[in-house]
Image (tube, rainbow, N blue to C red):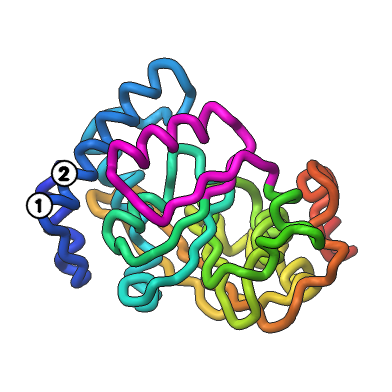
Amino acid sequence: MNPEAFRSALQKHQITLNDYQMHQFDTYYHDLIDANQNVNLTAITAQNEVYLKHFYDSLLPAFFVDALRNEPLRLCDVGAGAGFPSLPLKIAFPKLAVTIVDSLNKRINFLQSLVTDLNMTNVELIHRRAEDFGNKKSPARATFDIVTARAVAALPVLAELCLPLVKENGYFIALKASHADVEIKQAQYALQVLGGQLVADHQLLLPNEAGVRHILIIKKNKPTPKKYPRKAGTPNREPLLAKETR
């Protein structure tokens, strides 16, 4: 998917990118490739692949959540790595106020340079473990309209990292690949405990038969108990699973 094919494919979903936004995506691509020589950001480096599997893929939530397109939402991206999906969403929908949380300072440094090059405002970069950023003492807890995560961990783990950050009646959006149905079953107990409910599983095929994607929309119906998230590392070691699935 070259840049013009990317632009055309988004237009089919009523997402229109102007020339400046296309320039931002071009800058993003070149900054990513340059930085990737020194920091392990992505194994995908060919332009056509980056535009399809990183940029286009990151915008999939906006196909299904109109508020991302139209409202000045507060969005937190947990474990964003090289900025996916939050920075492509920010380019396409500049009204968004984006907070990125990542545990690796090298990635945060790259993102700081990138945000400067993209001339972005209302982007906050946080070098911290998600467990610490969302704990009961954190001022960020339960303050975001939407929290996103892409290719970070299994859904039961992600739910514990992300739902504490979502405000009541807000949404946690998980971007998943082909085995999402298995993760959804595994995560039912965690969602129940943490105050979330799966309200939609949007399945689609990337262009050029590049793979199946699931956009999981999870609504936060009630506050997350204060004991969650647990201490750093615990959600990964001891995910919240129903007894029969442990």
Determine whether 107 is above or below 220 in the image: above
Residue 69 occupies quadrant:
bottom left
Q: Residue at label 2?
A: 23
Give the spatial CA distance, label 1 vs label 2.
6 Å
Q: Is residue 110 left or right of residue 136?
A: left
Q: Residues within 10 Å of mark 2 (few under 14, many from 20)?
A: some
Q: Residue at x 34, y 44 (%)?
A: 53
The image shows residue 51, relative to residue 197, as above or below, that is: above
The secondary structure type at the circle numbered 2 is helix
Which amino acid type is shown beneath numbered disc 1? Asp
Magenta residue span: 100-129
- Going by the image, does 38 lie left or right of 52? right
Few, some or many residues within 10 Å of mark 1 (<14, 14–19, 20+): few
* Residue 138: image location, x then y, percent: 74, 58
Residue that appears at 60% across and 78% down: 219
Residue 161 locus on image (x, y percent)? 69, 56
**Labels 1 & 2 near each other (Cβ < 8 A):** yes
Q: Is residue 218 left or right of residue 130?
A: left
Q: Which amino acid lies under the numbered mark 2 shown in the image of this protein? A: His
Q: Quadrant of residue 137?
A: bottom right
Q: Is residue 198 covered in magenta?
A: no
> On the image, numbered disc 1 is attached to which residue?
19
Q: Where residue 73 appears, x then y in whole percent?
A: 44, 71
Q: Quadrant of the C terminus?
A: bottom right
Q: Between residues 36 and 197, which one lies in front from this camera angle?
A: 36
Task: Report x, y in % for residue 186.
Answer: 72, 62
